[in-house]
Amino acid sequence: MDRNLVQLDGPLQQPATSKDDPALPSSRRDLDDGAAAHASAQASAPAADPAAPPLTGTATPPPLDGPALRDNCDQRRPQEEDNTRLKKMPFELVSKTVSPFLKEHIPGLYAPVGKGNKDDASDPTAVRNKDPNTRYCYRHRPDSKCRRAADETKMGFIQSELSSLPIADQEAITHVWSLFSAAPSKHRDLMLQGIITQCCFPQLSTVSREVHEQLKIDFLTALPTELSYKILCHLDTVSLCKAAQVSVRWRNLADDDVVWHRMCEQHIDRKCTKCGWGLPLLEKKKLMAWSRHQSAHHRHEHAHHAGGTAAVDDDAAAKSSQESNKRSLAVRDDGPSKRPRLNASGHPASQPDVERKFRPWKDVYRDRYKVGYNWKTGRCAIKTFKGHDNGVTCLQFDDNVLATGSYDATIKIWNIETGEVLRTLRGHASTVRCLQFDDSKLISGSFDKTIKIWNWQTGECLSTLQCHTEGVLSVHYDGCTLASGSIDRTVKIFSFDTKQTFNLRGHTDWVNHVRIDSPSRTVFSASDDMTVKLWDLDSKQCVKTFRGHVGQVQQVLLMPPDFEPDEVPGEDTADTPSGDRGRSRSRSATPTTPPPPPPTMTTTSAAEHTVDVRASFGSGFASDHSRPLPPRYMLTGGLDNTVRLWDIEAGRCIRSMFGHVEGIWGLVGDTLRVVTGANDSMTKIWEPRSGKCDRSFTGHAGPVTCVGLSDSRMASGSEDGEVRLYSFEGAVTEERGTPS
């Protein structure tokens, strides 16, 4: 079948055939004032065969060898068509059709100022109405700031294919693109619908593939940076790391400090409420180094401003101070510097200042995540310390120093890195039952009825306190206050600033453990009489008694203020205390104080509830509303093989943790985990919020009498004379312990 195809140089027109031809399609005219050119290009010239039926409406030409199907595109348009018969549209016709269309819809490009339509210029009263259809999507709107960038690969392929065509075909295709680009939204939809209805299945597959790719919108590029940060802050760490691999733009956004600072706030030193994942803080040595650096920095700033001199780059210094303060509160981490910063004197800033300012929060999170992952999976390295002649009764470690006390009446100071004994403190006449040390001093208590204060760095005994009539079982100091518990059933309080001492009496058996809470000026004590008592240091009276253990209570652990249990089970009447009148918030039969307030409590009711809570802690708290309350929760361990979680305000046990088969001697913990050591020679790690045991460690040949805990390490001492230190930091590949 012979057909006369028309090639346009400008807008697509009706085929250049005889006007008297009756077979010319009549319905391919005027597709929205300019789009008809493309539609008419699809129509064929009259067939050479006079018997062929004329084309009417939008009907497609008859097939060559069968019925009209959508997949016989090659049959309807054979490849052997004679392109030399294509005719080129004169330039005059282009100016009459394409140019007005482009001027109408893109006046800024095709009808600049001074080159408007002559007809409009001749009619000053003519008012051009705005076309309601000239709305563009954000991809094609000319004044949009979020237009997507061109795909260089795709555009290069199109340009290559276009260059391989004859000049006439290139002009025709370019004109079609120009018309579509200039068309408003409504016209574009109509053009696309007409084109798609004429596509065969292979072409529809091409359309589907291209549309699928084009619909992938880079929303982070389209949105403002602040909204992109807001979206990324809702992702987890795995998703953020994947987002950083998408493109350079995504990497810059996903790695920004704004996003990872939020991530650190959610996870470091706390359990995330969404994913349940928590990461540890730094070692104390680093924290103290930062504290000293901050103090020196503030002193320098104060002296500098007092002298009236101008600092170099005040804005930068203020910004650095703000960032330093915020990071010290949130994570307080350090790391390698990226570039030096000059201080006011023109010299490079100190190394901690440089590290603090320029270390990315993502690096901070990465370091903590590695340690947290090792804790979760039990991947650790174990180091054993042997040197005592008898069993180990107490221990404490901090950074690179380990202190241990033993039945052999000595205290040994160890270098954790090398495992060597730095020095041995001798002076006690009997078992060293407890110890505590800081940077400058070590305080120990012994069965010889004395408390000794040592300079552990030199080995010198600075002072000996003869304070109890029986052996000392526990010591704890905080600030200028020292508390001790003894076999003589008393708690002794020493105030170093006021030089006062007094006894707290009330227990009926050995006082095994004491803990000071300085903000509330209270002391907790655990005893063999199976109770835990809360003492007011101002009134020197017991204000609460906690009963619930059925064995001797050996340890007390005060939980951080941000600790909240996952769920609080129903009250267990067997664990409900029956303390003195007015000292507990919940009682087994007739509670003397109301239950916790409901969420919809009014302001008046909330105030009354606060008064009732303070009254439950005694007159000292009820009369002084500015006095902080004791911690909300505490954990206790006893020889009844259980660890119990207590609501201190309510005065009741809200959870019991079971796992050990013999009595518990050691209990330490923080916001993320709790570690216990027991008479069954096992060390267990617990999740404090749920009360579940995460992992159990064995290895000691005797009862585990004491345990220690830091951000990345755990230690246990046993009556077998050994101390085992578990380090979860570094590249550890071996899994230890037994998961529960």
Image: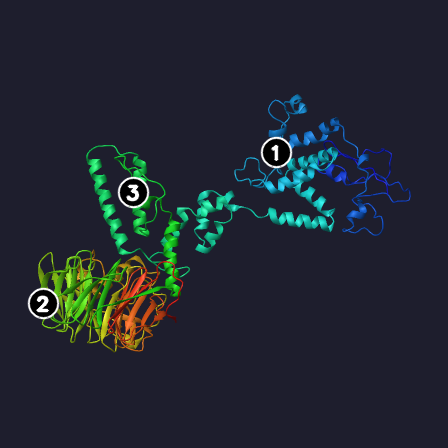
Q: Which mark is residue 418?
A: none
Placement of the N terminus among the 4 image quadrants: top right
Q: Is mark 3 on a helix, strand or loop?
A: helix
Q: Nearer the viewer, residue 361 or 734?
A: 734
The spot of residue 300 in percent (x, y) is: 22, 40
* Residue type marked 3: Ser
Instruction: Classify mark 1: residues with Cα within 10 Å, few (<14), some (14-19) or many (20+).
Output: few
Placement of the C terminus among the 4 image quadrants: bottom left
Tell me if residue 8 comes above or below residue 446 in the rendering.
above
341 to the left or right of 534:
right
CB atoms of marks 2 and 3 within 8 Å: no
* Residue type marked 1: Lys
Front tag of 1 and 3: 3
Tell me if residue 342 comes above or below residue 477 in the rendering.
above
Instruction: Give the Cα distance between marks 2 and 1.
Output: 96 Å
Closer to the chain start, of discs 2 and 3, is 3
Closer to the chain start, of discs 1 and 3, is 1
Q: Nearer the viewer, residue 712 or 574?
A: 712
Q: What element carries label 1?
A: loop
Q: In this view of the protein, can residue 236 be seen by the observer? A: no
Q: Residue 467 carries which label?
A: 2
The spot of residue 502 in percent (x, y) is: 10, 65
Kindly indicate the quadrant of the structure image that contains residue 10.
top right
* Residue type marked 2: Cys
The spot of residue 142 in percent (x, y) is: 57, 35
Q: In this view of the protein, can residue 31 be seen by the observer? A: yes
Q: Mark 1 points at which residue?
A: 130
Kindly indicate the quadrant of the structure image that contains residue 26.
top right
Q: Is mark 2 on a helix, strand or loop?
A: loop
Q: Mark 3 points at which residue?
A: 321
Instruction: Give the Cα distance between marks 1 and 3.
Output: 56 Å
